[in-house]
Amino acid sequence: MLVIDDWAMAPMKESERRDFWEICEDRYQARSMILTSQMPVSKWHEQIGDPTVADGILDRIVHNAHRIEMRGASMRKKRKGEEPAGKDPAGGA
């Protein structure tokens, strides 16, 4: 099992695209991978950069994938007792 946290947070450089392509190709239909990202899936292609490489990477990631999309406030902020901008912790406006 390979776990990649905060994937695609910045545009990939050529060497990063090539390395990640090799990882995806090696693991495709043989080994499991978990990706977490704060970047919406709709932006992943753009973050990878090269359209041909992005197609190959995303085809291998998405094929047979189970996608779980989280919504709501950050659990880290909730644990720290922080409230999202514009919310009054006392319940007022």
Image (spheres, rainbow, N blue to C red):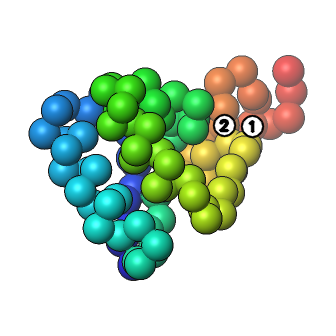
Report whether 82 appears left or right of 29: right
Image point (57%, 58%), residue name: 63
Residue named by callout 2: 83
Q: Position of residue 4 (x, y in %)?
A: 37, 59
The disc labelled 2 sits on which kind of residue?
A: Glu
The amino acid type of the residue labelled 1 equals: Pro
**Residue marked by disc 1:** 89
In this view of the protein, can residue 10 be seen by the observer?
A: no
Query: Is the Cβ of the residue at disc 1 closer than 8 Å to that at disc 2?
Result: yes
Give residue 8's position: percent from left, percent from top.
Answer: 38, 39
Spatial separation of the CA atoms under disc 1 and disc 2? 6 Å
Give the quadrant of the C terminus: top right
How packed is label 2: few (under 14 Cα within 10 Å), some, or many (20 or more)? few
Whichever of callouts 1 and 2 sits on the residue coming sooner in the sequence is 2
Q: Residue at x 51, y 41 (%)?
A: 38
Asked if residue 80 lies left or right of residue 70, the reply is left
In the figure, 84 relative to 57: above or below?
Answer: above
Total count of labels: 2
For residue 87, say whether it is visible. Answer: yes
Helix, strand or loop at mark 2:
loop
| Residue in front for this viewpoint, 34 or 62 | 62
